[in-house]
Image (spheres, rainbow, N blue to C red):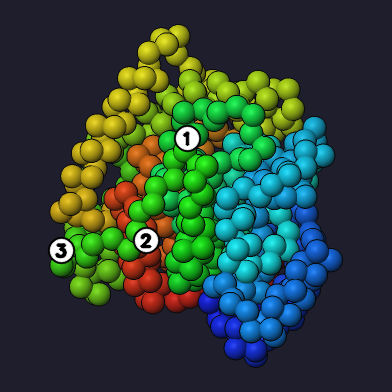
Amino acid sequence: MELWQLDATDLAHLIRTGRASAREATQSVLARMDAVNPKLNAIVRRFDAEALTVADAADAARARGEALGPLHGVPVTTKINTDQKGHPTDQGVVGMKDFIATEDAPVVANLRKAGAIIVGRSNAPAFSMRAFSDNALHGKTLNPRDKGVSPGGSSGGAGSATAAGMGPIHHGNDIGGSVRIPAYCNGVVGLRVGHGRIPAFSPMATAGRAIGGQLMSTQGPHTRTVRDARLALEVMAKGDPRDTRWADAPLIGPPPKRPIRVALVPEMPGGYTHPAQAAAVRTAGKHLEAAGYVVEEALPPDLEQIPDMWNIIGSNDVFRQLGPNMEKYGDEGGITSMRLWLELCPPSNDPTIVLDTLAARDYLLYRWQCFFQDTPLVIMPTLGHLPPPQDQDLTLEGQRLMLDSIRVSFVAPFLGLPGLAVPVGSHGNLRTGVQILAGRFREDLTLDAGEVIEAAEGVVGVIDPMW
């Protein structure tokens, strides 16, 4: 087996024990990029020389007997919207191509501290606000399972690269589904952490984020194994005292009452759910039931209200801040998608609506936390529909279908909850999949359940582009 085919856990072990070197691992991943990235355009900036220099230093550190981090010598990538010292935080925008970061964002710094070797940057749409990873600066990313289908967004480059074996861990972030949707579209594992789990400020920022971004946007990894998602979480969640939202919460919470109860939501109320997606939820439930979980179909509190409430914050707060920059600097696809989104979910003239929605959010989160006391896990589709055709969001009807599909992905960010996307079942060349939600700071419960599902479904294998 080639080194690029291994997950991070096995690769780190080989490097730690001297059975492979960091240089060999890096060269192997770079060679895999050479082989498949020209077809996919998932990695849009490469750091071959820099990465090999860091790999040589990692091998020298091991030879000197220095303490090694948990990802020592493991190649990873970061997303183009996150600061990485010495490289552009270009957001997929032509006008920002020379906006060079002078300091790492905390999540990038944490990857480096753990010994990871950053080999490149993954693609995203302009300003990371589409479920399609295409922009005027870097071009379009393709899905290795079907080039006519979106690889997801906004972390679509990360999802595509993970599926195709261009490294075992790829960083992403998620305000409405941007880690979980690419994981679903490409058939890999994606962990959106809960609010406050991973420090996430931009050292380059000169103004505060919109309140919706502060409360709903989080970081997370794309991987091919659940154990790698757990490993990446441990690394990424190291704190930074400058972060205004990071919480020093334990990664493993108190043991829940046994047997663990699970609520299945096969169909998202208020919209369409494809039968294959509903079937994936019920199949995941059977896997967990076989492992001793108590599973029943049940609706958590006020579920149907949440997508509309996300859109109130999105239209009146997130897009209020982002909109002028998109109109000024964005590309045609990003501008069109945003305008259609706002046509379907127009902002209000009532200045109190966001405040009222934030107050309602607090109460809904309280009700969900009460629900989790008895039923610690909720399993839902990752998207309501199958992965969308490329550029579906560039017509009004297509954007209407897209917003209907992502209703289910809005739940976790609106409430600030963790959500783990895992593949379950298939539909032609595509994988169907589910997301596992848990209470605040209970990523551990989602990962435990994800490992049960993974054991039944099989570990995700690397794929070559299917054309």
Q: Nearer the viewer, residue 217 or 342?
A: 217
Q: Residue at x 58, y 23 (%)?
A: 321
- 316 to the left or right of 50: left
CB within 8 Å, label 1 to label 3: no
Q: Secondary structure at mark 2?
A: loop
Label 1 to label 2: alpha-carbon separation:
21 Å
Q: Which circle's residue, 1 or 2, is located before the other in the chain?
A: 1
Q: Give the percent coordinates (x, y) of residue 345.
A: 47, 23
Q: Give the percent coordinates (x, y) of residue 207.
A: 60, 27
The amino acid at mark 2 is Leu
Label 1 to label 3: alpha-carbon separation:
32 Å
Q: Which circle's residue, 1 or 3, is located before the other in the chain?
A: 1
Q: Which residue is mark 3?
A: 257
Q: Inspect this view and state whether residue 42 appears.
A: yes
Q: Nearer the viewer, residue 194 or 376?
A: 194
Q: Which residue is mark 1?
A: 214
User: Closer to us: mark 1 or mark 3?
Assistant: 1
The numbered mark at residue 324 is none
Q: Which circle's residue, 3 or 2, is located before the other in the chain?
A: 2
Q: Which residue is mark 2?
A: 251
The amino acid at mark 3 is Lys
